[in-house]
Amino acid sequence: MTAFLIVLALVALVVIVTLVKSVRVVQQQTVGIVERFGKFKTGLQPGLNLLTPFVDKVRYTIDMREQVVAFPPQGVITEDNLMVSIDSVIYFQVNDPVRATYEISNYIQAIEQLTMTTLRNIIGGMDLEQTLTSREEINEKLRYVLDEATGKWGIRVNRVELRSIDPPPSIQDSMEKQMRADRDKRAAILTAEGMRQSAVLSAEGQKQSAILTAEGDKQSRILRAEAERQARILKAQGEAQAITTVFNAIHAGKPDQGLLAYQYLQMLPSIAQGDANKLWIVPSEIGDALKGLGSAVGQVAGIAQQAEGNWEAPQLDNGQVPEIDSAAPAAVAEADNAVREAIAAAESAAVSTRGQAAPSMPAVPPPTPSQEPPAQEPPQR
């Protein structure tokens, strides 16, 4: 009984071990490489897979996802014999797990070494300046070489990136000084350019301002000249109209010789007024003007002895017309007295002035009330 139980336990153990060996679960995005007696048999797909126990064996499990591998910095010599340190990052993916397993023993190490040699070849044909400024070009060349070399390994290189390119410390210091000097140069150039532009704009503004000022002055002078011309024209027209009006009014009023001579004598005292008058010149025509003052002695040529025309008497409120014939001699006598007073005032003003005395003027005797001037012919017009 005891032996039977021992045998039964051994059989159960063998069955369990056989089941474990024949069942294999593969994760998603992974492939299992199955070998039978050391030879490739098949690839296990993700999920539950059955194997022949004690015959088939899963040798490798390949990750089919895209992988990122960062390589440590490597020293590379440029064309101008400068050592730079470059570290890179490779993005790759396994396309054929069988070839990636049997074509290369360690594809990650192979990619690293291939990256180092390719970088030396690419950087060796560039100087330091080109190396620092041609990073995109280096990435593209490196990716092309790696993708072509790893294609037979069942691996595809998707992307290559250079994380840093570090020149020696002495070169970095020199580059910083050069960059600082270049920036100072650019700043000085930009400052000078700004000052030049400012000066040009200021001169242009002053030019435009002077032009506008000259244009405004020109327009102002033109407008003032036009206004002055219009004012003179209007003043001349007004004076002409005033002279015409006065001339027409005088002729319409028909003044006689006595009125004109009386107005002429009234202006003589005004001529003698003023403290600065040193010399008073009496016109010689005043003698002719005085000859016709209310007398019948003579007549000044060109001046009517008496006003001609029909005079209308003013209308009174009661409709009666006053008589003016009896008052005519009294009015003439009053005018003669006023003329004599004006002559006396003119003579006293002339005597009071310092300088040469004015020539004496002939006295005109006042006419008697009964004396009548002789009949005269009307002046020729």
Image (spheres, grey):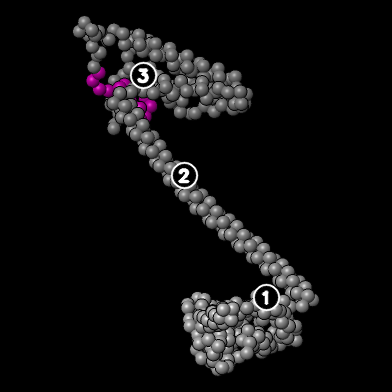
Q: Toward which corner of the image does residue 143 lie, by quadrant?
A: bottom right
Name the kind of residue labelled 1 in the image. Ser
x and y, in percent, of residue 185 in the image: 70, 69
Using the image, tell me which numbered label, if any, was put on residue 224. Answer: 2
x and y, in percent, of residue 297 in the image: 38, 20
Residue drawn where x is 48% and y is 29% of the image: 284
In contact (CB < 8 Å): disc 1 and disc 3: no
Tell me the crowding category of disc 1: few under 14, some 14 to 19, or many 20 or more residues within 10 angstroms, Cα based: some
Name the kind of residue labelled 3 in the image. Ala
Q: Name the secondary structure under disc 2.
A: helix
Q: Nearer the viewer, residue 276 or 204?
A: 204
x and y, in percent, of residue 345 in the image: 51, 16
Q: Residue furthest left?
A: 319
**Vertical arrangement, residue 164 with respect to residue 290, above or below:** below
Q: Nearer the viewer, residue 374 or 182?
A: 182
Residue topped by disc 3: 296
Q: Residue furthest right?
A: 170
User: Is residue 29 in view from this perspective?
Assistant: no
Mark 1 or mark 3, which is nearer to you?
A: 1
C-alpha separation, residue under disc 1 versus residue under disc 2: 80 Å
Q: Name the secondary structure under disc 3.
A: loop
User: Is residue 72 in view from this perspective?
Assistant: yes
Residue topped by disc 1: 164
Q: Which residues are magenta?
A: 296-311
Predominant SS along the magenta part: loop
In contact (CB < 8 Å): disc 1 and disc 2: no
